Amino acid sequence: VTLDRAGDGPARNLETRVWLGVLAVHGEIFNRLNRAFMREFDITLAKFDVLAQLDRFPGGLTQGNLSRYLKVTGGNVTGLVRRLVADGLITREMSAADRRAFVVRLTAKGAEKFKAARELHDALLREWFGGSSQDDLEVALQSLMRLGQRVQAGRREGSA
Amino acid sequence: VTLDRAGDGPARNLETRVWLGVLAVHGEIFNRLNRAFMREFDITLAKFDVLAQLDRFPGGLTQGNLSRYLKVTGGNVTGLVRRLVADGLITREMSAADRRAFVVRLTAKGAEKFKAARELHDALLREWFGGSSQDDLEVALQSLMRLGQRVQAGRREGSA
């Protein structure tokens, strides 16, 4: 993953260069977090993301809603859920409200593993972004939030 | 994909919120581009990324170097290459210089498909980010470049 195309100057339009910048930062951090999680906790970043979403819903989530909330792209939800059940980190049960739906929940072991992994996650990000000033990070955050809102507004206007 | 966690306020540290912002924008654009490419060109974004890297090297790339240059995470390079060969978009041949290495190259059909897909890619990004001012986009780009440089500097200092 390199930043060269994002810094390419006027060869591509500005919108494309912003996207290449997102891809470069995403790829670098994604790969590092994934390696650290595999090494320390034997879980992928995609599995961590499932645990993170379930941690927000102690009552459990249907597989459909889980799928909507996931932030990490590329994981196959059905496969991830099956492997996390096999790991003993989540349960998957038929919904009492809708017998066609399945509800997934963290186990105690899953909640514990998530807590430890999240501590490492936040500590590593602090370290990797640590050379940036708080002002730079605030600017980056505001900028990303604005981009995200623009893109989502575009979708609401039906231009996707 | 939602921005809610990034906007969560002080519940998580600023570095983590920046990363959640990257994930939210990445996930939204990734999914949209992927869907558009599947619909219009019958290729995934991961395949497009392979074509994009090969387009920069008319003499071809070894599979090892290709793997290093890819920006889109999650694709399995060996599998992507095999499927693109089957699609007739690239070739894969033993390297003349090193018989243990394979060199991959765009075919004429692959180069043509890449050119058309890149036009759509840039047009869609212009549309989706189009509500942002040029100033906002410049700030976003500079901010992402700085983040990427920080993270890579951290690695050179051995803190990964």
Image (tube, coloured by chain):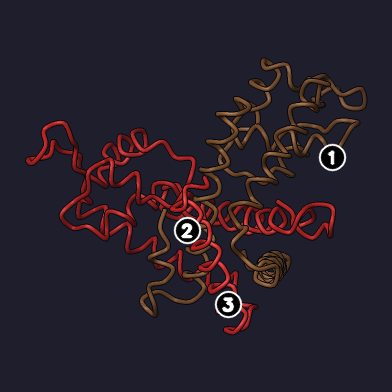
Chain colours: A red, B brown
**Chain to which the residue tagged by mark 3 belongs:** A
Look at the image and tell me whether residue A56 can be seen.
yes
The amino acid type of the residue labelled 2 equals: Ala
Residue B56's disc number: 1
Q: Secondary structure at mark 1?
A: loop
Residue located at (54% from left, 51% from top): A35
The alpha-carbon separation of the residues under discs 1 and 3 comes to 33 Å
- x and y percentages locating residue B13 in the rendered image: 45, 76
The amino acid type of the residue labelled 3 equals: Leu
**Chain to which the residue tagged by mark 1 belongs:** B
The amino acid type of the residue labelled 1 equals: Arg
Question: Front-most of B132 and B114?
Answer: B132
Residue located at (69% from left, 66% from top): B141
Q: Secondary structure at mark 3?
A: helix
The alpha-carbon separation of the residues under discs 2 and 1 comes to 34 Å
**Mark 1 neighbour density, 10 Å: few (under 14) some (14–19) many (20 or more):** few
**Chain to which the residue tagged by mark 2 belongs:** A
* Quarter of image, res A144: bottom right
- x and y percentages locating residue A112 in the rendered image: 27, 59
Residue, disc 2? A153
Relative to residue B157, is residue A151 drawn left or right? left
Question: Front-most of B49 and A106?
Answer: B49
Are the residues under badges 2 and 1 in a single subunit? no
Residue, disc 3? A137
Look at the image and tell me whether residue B101 can be seen.
no
